[in-house]
Image (cartoon, helix red, strand yellow):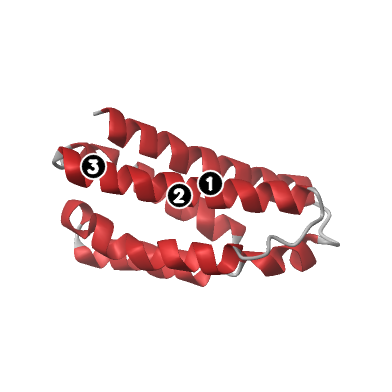
Amino acid sequence: MIDKILSVAKALFSFRGEFQKAKREKRDRIADLFEKISNCVKDVYSELKSDEVPHGKCAEMLTYANMLTDTVKDEIGEERAEELAKDLIEAHEVEVLLWQLHNVPDKDLQLSKLDEASGVFMALANIVRAS
């Protein structure tokens, strides 16, 4: 699940040039969605690091995942947008991560991937917004 979130972030980052070509209003919508995803992932990271269940974050992540296709399909193609949205939908159950990470020897590494994914989404939001 964590690897999938990071993979989606990196895949979307690879399309930053396409997002930058969109009109200002569309770039702002795209950037806003990426920023919201980043903040959600950052909150999940913080709560998991504190050994807390990230309550409500599953529904939040699912909402953003469901918005992804319509938000970016014109820039990256509907098929690719749907694939990435599907991957994010499959990874939306972040509340169960606390249990999955409880006895994992590389918990800190896994958590660092969430932190990285949040950073990639935020960087992408900032790049798209600034162009």
Q: Residue furthest top?
A: 130
What amino acid is at disc 3? Arg
Earlier along the polypeptide chain: callout 2 or callout 3? 3
Disc number placed over residue 97 in the picture, else none: none
Earlier along the polypeptide chain: callout 1 or callout 3? 3
- Name above or below for residue 59 compared with residue 20: below
Q: Quadrant of the C terminus?
A: top left
The residue identified by callout 2 is 36
Q: Is residue 17 left or right of residue 127?
A: left
- Name the foreground residue: 76 vs 106: 76
The residue identified by callout 1 is 39
What amino acid is at disc 1? Asn
Does dot 2 land on a helix, a strand or a loop?
helix
Disc 2: CA contacts within 10 A as few (<14), some (14-19) or many (>=20): some
The residue identified by callout 3 is 27
Q: Quadrant of the N terminus?
A: bottom right
- Name the foreground residue: 12 vs 30: 30
Q: CA distance from mark 2 to mark 1?
A: 5 Å
Q: Residue at x 83, y 61 (%)?
A: 102
Q: Residue at x 21, y 59 (%)?
A: 73
Q: Is residue 24 left or right of residue 67?
A: left
Find out whether the residues at labels 2 and 1 contact each other: C-beta distance under 8 Å.
yes
Residue 41, position as x, y percentages in the image: 57, 51
- Name above or below for residue 103 compared with residue 32: below
Disc 3: CA contacts within 10 A as few (<14), some (14-19) or many (>=20): many
Q: CA distance from mark 2 to mark 3?
A: 14 Å
- Name the foreground residue: 74 vs 33: 33
What amino acid is at disc 2? Lys
Residue 98, position as x, y percentages in the image: 76, 62
Camera sees residue 80: no
Q: How many marks?
A: 3
